[in-house]
Image (tube, coloured by chain):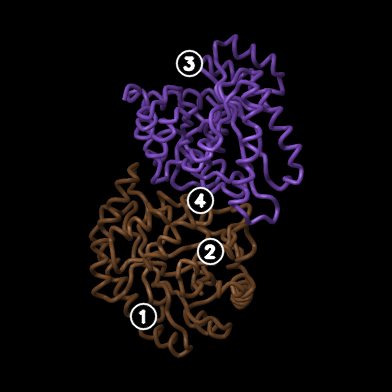
Chain colours: A brown, B purple
Amino acid sequence: MNHATVRVQYGMAQFVEQCAAHGYAGVSVWGAEVEKVGFATARSMIADHGLFVFGYNRAGPLMGPDFHRKDEAMDAARREIDRAAEIGADHVMLFPGGFVSGEKDLSGARQRFAEMAKVLLDHAKTAGIRLALEPLHPMLVGDRTCMGTLRHANDLCDRLGEGTGIVVDAHHVWWDEALEPEIARAGAADRILAFHVNDWLLPTRHRLTDRGMMGDGIIDLKGMWRSILGAGYDGPLEVEIFSEDWWAEPGDRVLEIAMQRCREIFDGDTDA
Amino acid sequence: MNHATVRVQYGMAQFVEQCAAHGYAGVSVWGAEVEKVGFATARSMIADHGLFVFGYNRAGPLMGPDFHRKDEAMDAARREIDRAAEIGADHVMLFPGGFVSGEKDLSGARQRFAEMAKVLLDHAKTAGIRLALEPLHPMLVGDRTCMGTLRHANDLCDRLGEGTGIVVDAHHVWWDEALEPEIARAGAADRILAFHVNDWLLPTRHRLTDRGMMGDGIIDLKGMWRSILGAGYDGPLEVEIFSEDWWAEPGDRVLEIAMQRCREIFDGDTDA
């Protein structure tokens, strides 16, 4: 369970307690929330509840309106990579960020991101943690990322090499005709680090905070899960839902329904 | 100039007058607006002002919540194709439409659209007009279309053959890493029917009605125009901006600014 799903309802302590109570095996965390209780405390809190730390959010954004402060962005990213390792996360999310003010150069942004990722990869290897690239939906290209497809993420992983991997988020990639071949390609390179589940609602009212609960939208999640298992992924599902509607619900209800939907949608296929 | 850009300000007669007054050479029209004055009247109105009809909107949507009425959708599309021919348009836009209620089968929708397009292509050939496929932004896949990339449109044109073509809309395709190769591919097959210009705003507040005026956003329009000219396109630019902000402005101001921006951004490159 990703903390963002219930970030409005729960601070770190309650989030960890409730996840354990609802039968989740692991958590994905956000640096800002971990910081509030302290990294050492958070780490033991999570361990005491028998949970593992899956994803750590996040290193970056590396670019954006403040790109003139590139060195600060890189230093901050290194710090987050160290913190991700410190809390024992499986992988750390690396976020490109958006355009520099006034910029209209998407391929230039992609080039810069590749170069920065290369530098940070060395740091991540030393810290002993994998860098996760997550392609975001094309509607977020420009203000959140320069990486809008799985193909782009796969190409970048080919270029960067060992120590990098890909997070497949259903909401971001479901629309892509190249979804199956690119999942297969990522699996063949053993680089699928996580599968984020959620859904695409009709209509989607907001680009950032109107994701659906699994089963409430139009994504063929069963089919996507089969492709991901078929590509050799043997990791967990991660529930990540940014939604004003679900943030307005009691946290324990959200955790309960999400677990129930995961069992309904994915359990039958776990040995596909 | 596409009527949608000033659809709130102008009915057919004023739209045609104002476009001629502002130095536009042609117009793209919408069936519902043409119908209000009658097709014969609209046609002579446009001719009397020395304008040509470029795009006709539209045949479709063919799918969506009402897909159980498939025959009605196909009959309506045939009628629109005939009307597009009647008003002397260069091409008629063919819109797939969204998912059937409860559907989660994107590849199935793509297959159905391809089959329906094949049937309508025969009708369009008889009517003597080209069918235009316009890939929409992936954020519109599911509720507006099943065709979210230029690659998909090119593949479909390969499959359908002569009589079909592609409309490249900057707002819908600018984010795609495959933009240049797919534009070159479309050009090599001599199937680029139109280039719709507008811009992608940061932030984009609405998926449908927050497009930008050329130059106000982050799209490298000069670069895209060079690619399109380089691919052999020798048709006009078409301004199509769906924007609550611009609909709130006086129509003549919108037409004036759009013309001015086109000259600033594209004129220097017309012989690229």
Q: Quadrant of residue B131?
A: top right
Q: Which mark is residue A87?
A: 1
Q: Residues within 10 Å of mark 4 (few under 14, many from 20)?
A: some
Disc 3 to disc 2: CB gap under 8 Å:
no
In which chain is the residue bearing label 1?
Answer: A
Q: CA distance from mark 3 to mark 1?
A: 64 Å
Residue type at mark 2: give it: Phe
Q: Secondary structure at mark 1?
A: loop
Q: CA distance from mark 3 to mark 4?
A: 41 Å
In which chain is the residue bearing label 3?
Answer: B
In percent of width and height, residue B199 lies at: 45, 37
Q: Secondary structure at mark 2?
A: loop
Q: Is residue A92 above or below residue B264?
A: below
Per the image, the residue denoted by label 4 is A177
Per the image, the residue denoted by label 2 is A242
Q: Which of pointers 4 and 1 indicates the residue nearer the eye?
A: 4
Q: Is residue A250 visible?
A: no
**Same subunit under labels 3 and 2?**
no
Q: CA distance from mark 3 to mark 2?
A: 47 Å
In percent of width and height, residue B1 lies at: 52, 24
Q: Residue at 32% x, 80% y: name it.
A: A86
Q: Which mark is residue B23?
A: 3
Residue type at mark 4: give it: Glu
